Image (cartoon, rainbow, N blue to C red):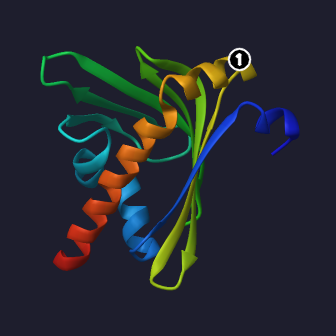
Amino acid sequence: MSNEANNRTLTLKRTFNAPIKLVWEAWTQPEHIAHWWGPKGMKINVNKHDFRVGGEWEYVMQMPDGTAFTSEGVYSVIIALQKICSSANFRPMTEGVEIQAIFEENGDQTNFTFHCIHPTEEYCRQQEQMGFYNGWGSVFERLSEFLEEQKSVV
């Protein structure tokens, strides 16, 4: 990533206590995504999930008060068990970003890196101040819990 792109990027890294195949499935199968995408307490509807380069995805989070938040994008890069890149809009809060999910096998665990690349540095800082790290941190905590549940099912 260029320095210029780095200045527009927010990054979260996690190590999930689950094999890479399970983490990949959690990211790529709609029946799994519905269990962890979004903060705790949110009901997730997977409206579209065309998992291929050029394919569209759309997930809707239902707030307890009935408000709906739509997440949507188009996949641009898919490298099995390694990387997923997509455009992304998280309406009404964030629009016009690119998200990158990078998976790296680490024995029985998976090193995971999440990049959110914004169109401008200013927009990136604004998103950071609006709670990017807390918001996505809680989503990935939910993913971690889901992976633990799935390991006991397998």
- Write down the residue under mark 1: 122
Where is residue 62 shown, x and y percent of the image?
19, 26
Quadrant housing residue 135: top left
Locate residue 81 relative to residue 5 in the image: left or right.
left
The reply to whether residue 154 is visible in this rendering is no
User: Which residue occupies 17% across, 38% down?
Assistant: 41
Q: Residue at x 60, y 19 (%)?
A: 126
Residue depicted at 28% across the width and 49% down the height = 36
Count of picture labels:
1
User: 8 left or right of 29?
Assistant: right
Taking depth in this image into account, of 14 and 22 the one nearest to the observer is 14
Residue 70, percent from left and from top:
34, 23
Rendered view: 74 above or below 70: below
Q: Position of residue 68 (x, y in %)?
A: 24, 19
Tell me: 50 left or right of 32.
right
* In the image, farthest residue toward the bottom: 107
